[in-house]
Image (cartoon, rainbow, N blue to C red):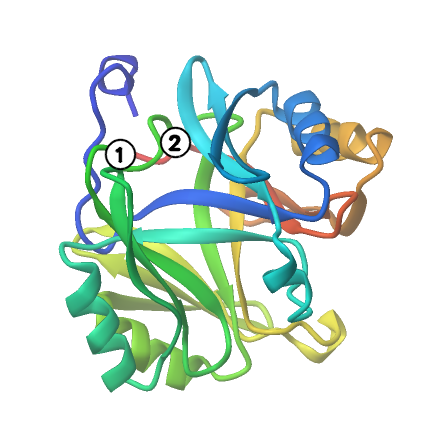
Amino acid sequence: MTEARMQETIEYAPGTFCWVELATTDDEAAKKFYTELFGWTFTDNPIGPGMVYTMLQLDGKDVGALFKMPEEMTSQGIPPNWLSYVSVKSADETADKAKSLGGTLMKEPFDVMDVGRMSIIQDPTGAAFAIWQAGTHPGAGIYNVPNSFCWNELATSDTAKAGEFYTGLFGWGKNVKEMGPMTYTSFMNGERPAGGMYKPTPEMGDIPPNWLAYFAVDDADAKVAKAKELGATITVPPMDIPDVGRFAVIQDPQGAFFGIIKLNQPPA
């Protein structure tokens, strides 16, 4: 993404990941961790009695958000997590389509003031994601640059079922490659990669189906060292993906997982 394009209002084509949002058990500790790790700033926005929605910023542009999980979430046993949002033309039509394809609506479509309309969906294999029909807020104002989100990746035990669901829901194509012992699917939104999908190998342990948000970094090893200093757990140490870059997976001090990657070439 060029500097000139970064200054413009970004529009996300339907079927594009456009936003990431952290639900956490300790918003103050999470703000401290992520601002120190990624150099973000933040703005707290009261959104109701005892509720604050914190916008996270990089270079003055919204890069994501976080909030403290209400009791209705924690009482259900939902762990801290980064939620990935996909841009859609109509939240209602997409939610209906998701149901017809075997998905479950965790949250029926609802308006977020004049900012947009959204729904939270669980795919047929169990991974959760959100859809976003933009109002005044299209999504992240900066992405694909160091310390902003750059990729979203689905781990699922049934890639055939998940693949059928997402291609049916968003019209994504599939580019399937063998990467050593793993088959990796890149979902394509037209000519652009939209996200990735793989089936965890037995050596990876018991990974529940989930969408993992990745943040671009300048130096994966240095960022991992910094994360450890700040109290994080490194669940996948830095390793190289041939022709792609060097990545790691981190669990923040509250328990949410995210990825980082130093890409060999910046995305278009």
Residue located at (30% from left, 55% from top): 118
> Seen in the image, is 182 located left or right of residue 169?
right
Q: Is residue 166 visible?
A: yes
**Kind of residue sitting beneath label 1:** His
| Residue count near mark 2 (Cα–Cα under 10 Å), binned few <14, some 14–19, many ≥20 | many
Kindly identify which residue carries mark 1.
137
Looking at the rendered image, the disc whose residue lies closer to the viewer, 2 or 1, is 1
How far, Cα to Cα, is label 2 from label 1? Answer: 15 Å
Coordinates of residue 254 in the picture (x, y in percent):
76, 47
- Image quadrant for the N terminus? top left
Residue 200 percent across, percent down from the top left:
61, 73
Left or right of 149: which side holds 186?
left
Which numbered marker is on residue 208?
none
Residue 76 drawn at (x, y percent): 64, 71
* SS class, disc 2: loop
Placement of 37 over or under 102, stated as above or below: above
The residue located at (82%, 30%) in the rendering is: 230
Camera-side residue: 204 or 105? 105
- Quadrant in the rendering for residue 33: top right
Q: Is residue 171 above or below residue 223?
A: below
Image position of 168 (left or right of 205)? left
Q: Is residue 171 at least partly visible in the picture? A: no
Residue topped by disc 2: 143
